[in-house]
Amino acid sequence: MQKTVLYDIHKQLGAKIVPFAGFEMPVEYGGINVEHMAVREAAGIFDVSHMGEFWVKGPNAFDLIQSVTSNDLSVIPVGKAQYSCMPNDEGGIVDDLIVYHYEDEKYMLVVNASNMDKDWNWINAKNSFAAELENASDKMSLIAVQGPKAGEILQKLTPLDLVSIPFYAFATGEMAGKSDVIISNTGYTGSGGFELYLYNEDAADVWQAIMEAGKEYGLMPAGLGARDTLRLEAGLALYGNDLTDSSSPVEANLGWITKLVDGNDFTSRPLFEKQKAEGVDKRLKGFVLEERGIPRKGYEIVDADGNAIGEVTSGTMSPMLKKGIGMGYVKSGFWKTDTEVFIRIRNKDVKAKIVKPPFVKLK
């Protein structure tokens, strides 16, 4: 098992450590719900250094990325980021990712930790353009500071004007006395905040500086447990649960990042064109339980007669709503908002209704 450079700090903070995507990662410190509410009301700091970072460089960098990702890379200028996915040859998803346009002819791809080797091999196999590829994952750390107070906390530590960094944009500069830190406004919690990409040797000092700066704001360290409940309340998909090698972006409600524009001839495009034109048999939908219960991945979704109509891909008890919430692929005919469905929990069919995420309306 690998460890991030912040592992010793997590142990000192009393974190519960679990294996995740080949790393020993903190799942919680003082309790998932406490950490969750800290992010919603003030701020939380996460170590997400297990994520992968690939640089794509050179005159053909654009052509390679445009050919392997479903979004339209041509619309993002330097300083902007883009959510996208890499389709496979069968119409499924290799991974979802964020593409950063760092400089002219230089991009950074941020991929999921569990898919790092798969993604690296996939991109290299598709690199008929002779673009320069560099896997910087082992050299970089990633710290996320999320919540309504995140900007105020980090502003104490940088000369950059964080307010001027809009959603899905970034700037590079000094943070807590360390140079060349990429400060990104993308987020995975629904509560705003920033992500800091920095060299491993700077990570511990920056983490400690943020913890100190955040004391007066109620900043708390937060683990993977709260990260999951936060992203689910925000209706954000997780690869391996809601996105898979066998689910298409159209089925996963990612048609908005599947851009069928001229010159964007990415993998499996003809299939997605057909799906957009003719429709699909299943689609990823959100639901809220109307009775007590906690939905979990793999639970069956059934209709009023007990007929199987889908399967839960993500589920939890919402700390904000105090209700069970989740997402799952549901067959056609049950997609309309407020449609009654049932989640089969321990052989009991628990009433739920289809809703459109996000589950929690946040500022």
Image: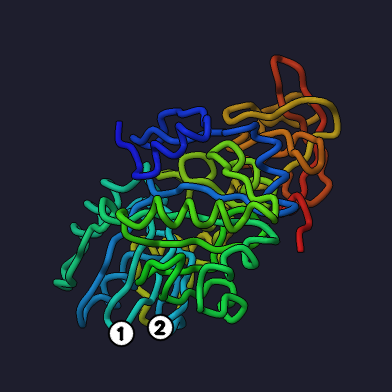
The residue at the point 52 percent across, 59 percent down is 275
Residue for badge 2: 78
Q: How many marks?
A: 2
Mark 1–mark 2 distance (CA, rounded to whole Å) = 7 Å
Q: Which of the two residues, 246 or 189, is positioned nearer the viewer here?
A: 189
The residue lying furthest to the top in this view is 347
Q: Which amino acid does label 1 sit on?
A: Asp
Q: In this view, does 319 lie above or below 116?
A: above
Rendered image: mark on residue 304: none
Q: Is residue 251 above or below residue 295?
A: below
Looking at marks 1 and 2 on the same chain, the residue that comes earlier in the sequence is marked by: 2
Residue 235 visible? The answer is no
Q: What element carries label 2?
A: loop
Q: Which of the two residues, 7 or 276, is positioned nearer the viewer here?
A: 7
The reply to whether callout 1 and callout 2 are in contact (CB within 8 Å) is yes
Q: In this view, does 81 lie above or below 95?
A: below
- Quadrant containing the N terminus is top left
Task: Residue 340: give x, y in percent of width and height.
Answer: 82, 38
The residue at the point 55 percent across, 60 percent down is 254
Image quarter of residue 351: top right
| Image color mode | rainbow
Horizontal side, residue 96 vs residue 199: left or right? right
Q: Which amino acid does label 2 sit on?
A: Val
Q: What element carries label 1?
A: loop
Rendered image: mark on residue 104: 1
Horizontal side, residue 195 vs residue 296: left or right? left
Task: Residue 156: give x, y in percent of width and height.
Answer: 58, 69
Horizontal side, residue 161 vs residue 263: left or right? right
- Quadrant containing the C terminus is bottom right
